[in-house]
Amino acid sequence: MEDDPGRDAKMKPLTLTLVLALLLTGIWLVPAPPAESAGPGFDHTATRFLLTGSHEQVRCEACHQQGIFRGTPTQCSFCHSASGTRAESVRSFSHVQSSNQCEDCHVTTTWENARFDHASASGACSSCHNGTQADGKPADHITTIAECDACHVDIAWEVIRFDHASVTGPCSECHNGIEATGKPNDHLQTNSECDLCHSTRAWTPATFDHSTVTGPCQSCHDGMTARGKPDDHLQTNSDCDLCHSTSGWTPANFDHVDVTGPCQSCHDGMTARGKPDDHLATNADCDLCHVTNAWTPASFDHSNVTGPCQSCHDGMTARGKPDDHFMTNRDCDECHTTQAWDPDTFRHTSGNYPGDHRRNLACTACHLANSETVQWPFPGLQPDCGGCHQSDFRSGPHKKYENPDTSYTASELRDCSGSCHIYTDSTLTTIKETRNGEHRVSDGSFD
């Protein structure tokens, strides 16, 4: 093509105009350097982006695509993006949630050794601290759904803020006496959790429900921890709830089998009905004769009676003396026994009593007036046999001496059981025959 001087003349004003426009806008159209200037020999320090670390090994066209050098972005995220057009390595889906630029934490020499500031993390603690990406809650951590930063700070893990409201596990999970204070040794026995009675705002006062207690009543109701049995309570080893309920102390259920004390400890006429005024006299306890199922009929043993027989055997409470009974003020048991009414067991103790006869005489055989005071038929001969038997005396068999034959009188032999002699004569100096106690009231040879 031939040079056209006219065309050059026409282009000069246009070139000046374009230069002025570029100067005013600040945009320079710098011709691309020749290919060899962007090669290994190119000094990248002359740009605003220094190549360091792994960037020194990257091919130029990986960042400067389509041969465009000027205006290449310098922020990591423009190259390390999900498009993968400039760099293969991108932020992973498991990356810490953060608004930071890569270079805020990472360096080009090694990706793994990153600087990290928890303040720059925008996600929840558990998004990293899940036991996989970073340490999670230890196995013995209190049960809670709260995020770590609800209690912990990243400056020091041990210095924590704590709010019971964020705990989802039971109280005893921590309050076991090891990790946190547990139930004291004198705590009432229960399997319930602490918050059933206590609150985190104040340990006392506490609400209370007897239904949650597992121990016996007296584990608390011992007179010190809680009110115990009153002094006038019936004697028993049973626990309170055997008779009482927590909804109301009275009225109470009652079972005599649980009572350990004697009947009269309650049945004293004040606490409970006692013996009636007409009860037989006895020191025995009620249950010796009566049972709790029914007061009557009652078993009975005379050996427990302390009063006289006639206190019962008066013809009304119990059978009394029959109409033909020997009249006496003596009590029944002086003659009779409780095992058998007959035969009677009375024994005379008076020195005037001649002794038991060979047959069992009726009392009235001697006590003619049916009285304890004996009226002797022959008072002059009392208390010897003759007092009763003077009319039975026969003088014939009772020789006193011979020459002439003479017999004893009833007065002389008033004691039939005594000895007597037969003398040779009236001088009564020589005994011819001796008879020693010929008669006995108990033998059969009297007649």
Image: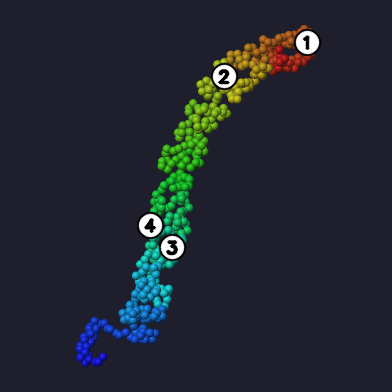
* Residue assigned mark 3: 137
Residue at the front extreme?
1
* Residue assigned mark 2: 328
Between label 2 and label 3, give the one nearer the viewer.
3
Marks 4,1: beta carbons within 8 A: no
* Residue assigned mark 1: 425
Mark 4 to mark 2 CA distance (whole Å): 95 Å
Mark 4 to mark 3 CA distance (whole Å): 18 Å
* Residue 108 drawn above or below residue 233: below
Q: Tag 1: residue type?
A: Asp
Q: Position of residue 241 (x, y in %)?
A: 46, 42
- Given residues 376 and 319, the one toward you in this image is 319
Q: Earlier in the sequence, mark 2 or mark 1?
A: 2
Snapshot quadrant of residue 365: top right
- For label 2, the SS is loop
Marks 2,1: beta carbons within 8 A: no
What number is the disc on residue 165? 4
Q: Earlier in the sequence, mark 4 or mark 3?
A: 3
Coloration mode: rainbow
Between label 3 and label 1, give the one nearer the viewer.
3
Q: Earlier in the sequence, mark 4 or mark 1?
A: 4
Q: Earlier in the sequence, mark 3 or mark 1?
A: 3
